[in-house]
Image (cartoon, helix red, strand yellow):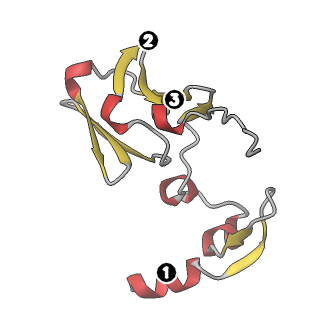
Amino acid sequence: MLSDVSKLNNRPVGTSGGGAAATYSPLREMLGYDPFRRFFSSVDPEIDVVRTEKGFDVEIPVPGYTPNQIEIVLKDDVLTLTGKSERRSLTRSLQLPDDIDSQNIEASVENGMLLPGLQRHPNAEPRRIDVKSCS
């Protein structure tokens, strides 16, 4: 059954607003929308990521979680956040670009938002190279 679903979901039908091919969804076909799209989407609309000169400003909502209920793990350039409380849990993952300094990632929680500090590696910073004359 699972393999049948994956075959259906890989069949493009129409286009989405961004011009990319939309995946086939029987629910979208019957109802006009897919109520489960958010659960299977590769993009989480709740995570806010903005590229800056120094790296990335990231905001991940974690309302109701205290810092000691949140675990962040970095493995193979994937940053995975896991939040666990008595009543609920959440997991979010971000694929980090190659130029992030993975040894100096810090995180804090402020007003229900997790703020991981993703700075560019110093070696990834552009530097000016002087051009000399050979004569």
Q: Is residue 75 above or below residue 32?
A: above
* Residue ID at (73%, 63%): 32
Q: Position of residue 1 (x, y in %)?
A: 39, 86
Mark 2: few/some/many CA within 10 Å (<14, 14-19, 20+):
few
Q: Residue at x 27, y 18 (%)?
A: 66
Q: Residue 132 location, x and y as percent?
A: 72, 38
Of residues 110 and 75, the one nearer the viewer is 75
C-alpha gap between disc 2 and disc 3: 14 Å
**Res 37 quadrant in image:** bottom right
For mark 1, what is the residue?
6
The numbered mark, 2 or 1, whose residue comes first in the sequence reads: 1
Q: Is residue 47 left or right of residue 104?
A: right
Q: Could you tell me which residue is drawn at 57 percent across and 83 percent down? A: 8
Quadrant in which residue 14 is drawn: bottom right
Classify residue 66 as left or right of residue 111. left
Q: Amino acid at mark 1?
A: Ser
Residue 56 picture quarter = top right
Q: Which residue is mark 3?
A: 58
Q: Quadrant of the C terminus?
A: top right
- What is the three-letter code of the residue carrying label 3? Val
First of labels 3, 1 by sequence position: 1
Give the residue number, with chain letter if any, for mark 2. 111
Tag 2: amino acid: Asn
Q: Is residue 59 left or right of residue 76?
A: right
Between the C-alphas of marks 3 and 1, the distance is: 31 Å
Instruction: Find numbered disc 3 in the image and state the secondary structure of the residue it sits on.
Output: strand
